[in-house]
Amino acid sequence: TLSAWILQLYDEAERIDLTAITWVGVVVLVYSAISLMVTIENSTNTIFRAPGGRKWSRRFPIYWTLLTLAPVAVLGTIYID
């Protein structure tokens, strides 16, 4: 029957190990976030005619701070509202 087939699919899906998929997802998420920040910085440099970009040793802490604090600030704003 249909319900038995659905339950069988559910049981098979429950047994799948998702550890590798989780790590791939984390890597893709971090890569996407950093790529977005680089694109935003490059666009801002183009708009304001900045002579050159920052070194990675300078970029990384700024990106890390923005990517960490921005969601906290958004959640704080929603909570206060």
Image (cartoon, rainbow, N blue to C red):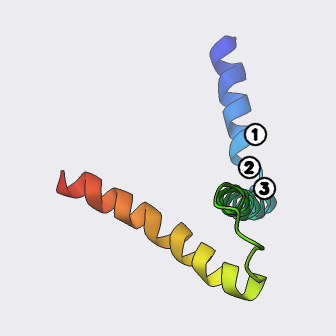
Give the side of residue 70 with respect to residue 80, left or right: right
Label 3 crowd bin: few (<14), some (14–19), many (20+), radius 10 Å: few
The quarter in which the N terminus is drawn is top right
Q: Name the residue under label 1.
A: 12
Q: What residue type is labelled 1?
A: Glu
Determine the image quadrant of residue 79. bottom left
* In this view, 15 is above or below 30: above
Q: Residue at x 45, y 64 (%)?
A: 70
How many tags in the picture?
3
* Picture coordinates of residue 72, whole percent (x, y): 39, 66
The residues bearing labels 2 and 1 have C-alpha atoms spaced at a distance of 5 Å
Residue 15 disc label: 2
Determine the image quadrant of residue 24. bottom right
SS at mark 3? helix
Sequence-first tag of 3 and 1: 1
Sequence-first tag of 2 and 3: 2
Q: Name the residue under label 3.
A: 21
* Picture coordinates of residue 61, whole percent (x, y): 61, 83
Tell us which disc is closer to us: 3 or 1: 3
Tell us which disc is closer to us: 2 or 3: 3
**Residue sitting farthest toward the bottom:** 57
Tag 2–tag 1 contact (CB < 8 Å): yes
